[in-house]
Image: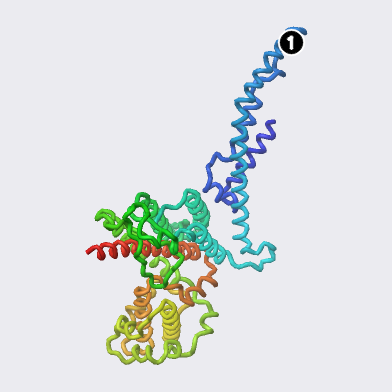
Amino acid sequence: MESSLNSEQNEVSVSGTPTSSVSSPYRRTYSDISGLSHRFDVQSFYNRPSNTNAVVLSGHEEDVSEDAEEPKDDVVNDVHGDGDEEDSDIDSAEEAELEMMRERFAKLLLGEDMSGSGKGVCTAVTVSNSITNLYATVFGQSLRLQPLSTEKKELWKREMNCFMSICDYIVEVIPRSLGTNVEITETKLRSDILMSLPALRKLDNMLMEILDSFTENEFWYVERGSSSMNSSGGGRDSGTFRKVVVQRKDEKWWLPVPCVPAEGLSEEERKNLRHKRDCASQIHKAALAINDSTLNDMDIPDSYLTTLPKSGKASVGDVIYKQLCTAEKFYPDQLLDILKITSEHEALELADKVEASLVTWRRKTGGLTHSKSSWDMMKDIGGDADRGNDKNHILAARARSLLFCLKQRYPELSQTSLDICKIQFNRDVGKAVLESYSRVLEGLAYNVVSWIDDVLYVDRTVRNRED
C-alpha cells in the first residue's frame, strides 16, 4: 500500500514540473489539488474500522460482533457512496480536459501534422491560427451587446492563459552589475513581451467588463425579417418602435436589429452608451497600435520582395504618383478625397499598392532591412526631412503618411498583403502571440463600437421623428 501511494505521489510531482510541455498549462489552468482527491479517498478507506481488526471471541459472541459491525459498514457505504460518485465524476471531467489540453499542445508542437513527419507548419503560425480559431469559437456567434455565457468566458480565459504561458519562457539574457569588476548575467522576459502582453491582458479585461455591463438595458434586439420586426408594436412594450432600419455601410443582413422604446432611450442610458463607446474606441486604438508595432518588427519575407515591380510608380499608378511627386506640400487627406473611394475593397486595394511602393522606395534608398522596429521607423521619418532633395526618400515619406491616413479613415480595413505574408512566414512565437492576440482584441473592440453606434442611430432616428 505504501509503495502504491508513493508511486502516485511521484506521478503527481513529475507532472507538475515546469519543464513538462503538457502539464505546465494544466498546472496554470486548473486547481493545484485537482489530482489528489482520489488518493485521499483511498487513505480514508483503509483507515476505516473493519471486521479484520475485531478481537476473535467464542461462537455466539463472534456472531453478535459481526452482526454489530455490518450496520456500520452499511452506514459508511451510504455516507460515502454519493461522495465517491461525485469525486469520480470530477476526476473523469478533469481527465477529459487534461487529455484535451494534451492533444491541443501536441498539435501545436507537431505543427498540425499528426503524422510526425515534419511536414506541418511552424509553431508560430500554428499558435497564431489557434488564437484566431479560438476567437471565432467564442465570439463568432456574439452579434449583439450582451454578456458572454459563463462557459464561453471560462473557455476564453482558460485557452488564452495556456497560449500566453508560452511567453513565460521567452526571455533575453542581460548583464547585471554587482558594483565590482565582475558582472553576471540574468534572464528577463523579452522587452516586447514585457511591455505589450500585460497591456493586452488589461485591454481584454476591460472589454469583458464592457460586455458584462449590458445586463439591464433599455434596448433589445429582433432578428431581421422576423414578424416582430415587421409589426409596429408588441415588443417589450405595447408602444415600441420597430420601423427603423439600421443603415450599415456593408449591409450586414445577418446582424440582429436593435430596438428602443417609442420615446427613445433615457438620458442616463444614452450617456452610459456613449461612455462605453468611447472606452471601446480607446481599446481599439491601443490594440491597433500594438498590432502595428508587432507587424513592423516582423521580417519582410523574400517571397514578397520578389513580387514587387522595379519601380514604385508601377505599383501606385500614374494618378497617385503624380500627386506624390508634383505637390510642394503633400496633403494625404486631400488625395483620398480626390480618389473617391466607395468601398472597403477599393480601400484595401489602394493600401496594398501604396505599401508595395513604400517598400520599393525604401529598398532604393538602402534604408530597408528585413525587419525594422517602431523606433527605427520614427527615426527614418525624422531623417527624411534632413535628406531634402532625395526623391526616393520624399516619396517613401509621403507614401507612409498616405497609408497612415487611409488606415485612420477606414479602421475596419482588413490586413494588407504584406501583413498577411509576414504572419504566414513568421517564425517568432512571441510575436505570433502578440500579433494574433492584439488582432482579435482589435476586432472585438471595433464590433462593440459598431453595435453601440447602431443602438444610438436607432435612438436618434426615433427622437427625430417625434420632433
SS at circle 1: helix
Q: Tell me which amino acid carries mark 1.
A: Glu
Where is 229 relative to 361, above or below?
above
Give the side of residue 435 with respect to residue 46, left or right: left
**Residue 22 place in picture, x, y as percent:** 60, 52
Of residues 448 and 52, the one drawn nearer to the viewer in this rendering: 448
Q: Nearer the viewer, residue 417 or 2?
A: 417
> Where's residue 79, x and y in %?
60, 25
Left or right, 338 with respect to 118, comes to: left
Q: Residue furthest left?
A: 467
In this figure, which colouring scheme has been used for the structure? rainbow
Residue 191 visible in the displayed image:
no
Q: Is residue 281 placed above or below 390 in the rendered structure?
A: above
Q: Nearer the viewer, residue 22 or 95?
A: 95
Residue at screen point 65% across, 27% down: 45
Position in image of residue 371 (x %, y %): 46, 74
Position of the C terminus by quadrant: bottom left
Residue 155 appears anywhere in the view: yes
Residue 315's x, y, as percent?
45, 87
Q: Is residue 59 above or below residue 304?
A: above
Query: Residue 341 occupies which quadrant of the picture?
Result: bottom left
The crowd level at tag 1 (other Cα within 10 Å; few <14, some 14-19, many 20+) is: some
Nearer to us in this view, 378 or 115? 115
Q: Going by the picture, which residue comes out furthest to the right?
A: 59
Residue assigned mark 1: 62
Which residue is rendered at x = 38% and y = 80% of the image? 342
Q: In the rendered image, which quarter is residue 208 located in?
A: bottom left
Vertical comparison of 308 with 268: above or below:
below
Q: Is residue 466 left or right of residue 367?
A: left
User: Looking at the figure, which quarter contains the N terminus?
Assistant: top right
